[in-house]
Amino acid sequence: MNIIGIDVSQGESHATLIIEEAEKVAFKFKHNKSGFQILNSYIRSNTIIIFETTGVYSAQLTAYLKSKKVKFYELNPLEAKLRMASLRRNKTDKNDSFKLALLGATQLTEIKNHCNKQFALPYDSLRSLSLRYKQLIKCRTRILNFLRSSLGLTFPELNQIFKKAYAVLALQVFRMYFYVKSSITRCLALLFWTNL
């Protein structure tokens, strides 16, 4: 049996293949069509893939493996950390992929019992929607923080007037203030140019 351990990162993964003859092959691939073809070149009929669930980053890999009907196990990150505690000396992506493959070689029966309970289709789609929702919440928080800091720089009094400077009413006042200010500036510029 061939076992591939994959350390999933954003857009790229490091992988290690352990062959029955105790041969070790390390490679990396991107999360795109050509990258998945590299992964596919190492997959045989008796290959098992093991990786940690990393939310949005591992979603592409999961979808690809399901479409190719490859046997894989997604480890909960906490469980992977506990299982690799004795193995994890120096943490690098290459070492982690090897240690995940080593877990598959040494503890496969335990991993089979705890991981990858296949969900029915509605639950699987809910899981992907939940991941997308978390990603959108992070994006919204980042935008609100940027807005808050920008408002603090350009119009610091807005925080004293309104409880939430990014509330709808506060933003309308802010927009009207700059609309009036820009209108006055345009009128002054027009008067200046007509007086020349």
Image (cartoon, grey):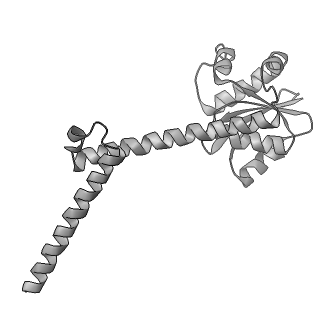
**What quarter of the picture does the C terminus occupy?**
bottom left
Residue drawn at 70 percent across, 44 percent down = 60
Residue 55 pos. (x, y %):
63, 35
Residue drawn at 87 percent across, 41 percent down = 69
As drawn, which residue projects farthest toward the left?
A: 195
| Quadrant in which residue 66 is drawn | top right
Choose between 23 and 160: the one closer to the eye.
160
Q: Is residue 185 above or below residue 98?
A: below
Residue 30 pos. (x, y %):
67, 47
| Quadrant in which residue 141 is drawn | top left
| Quadrant in which residue 70 is drawn | top right
Residue drawn at 83 percent across, 46 percent down = 41
What is the number of callouts on the image?
Answer: 0
As drawn, which residue projects farthest toward the right?
A: 45
As drawn, which residue projects farthest toward the front?
A: 169
**What quarter of the picture does the N terminus occupy?**
top right
Q: Is residue 141 visible?
A: yes
Using residue 147 as the reference point, say whether residue 73 is left or right of it.
right
Choose between 176 and 26: the one closer to the eye.
176
Residue 15 pos. (x, y %):
71, 36
Q: Is residue 97 above or below residue 29?
A: above
Residue drawn at 62 percent across, 45 percent down = 11
Residue 134 pos. (x, y %):
57, 37
Q: Is residue 14 visible?
A: no
Using residue 110 as the reference point, say whether residue 144 is left or right of it.
left
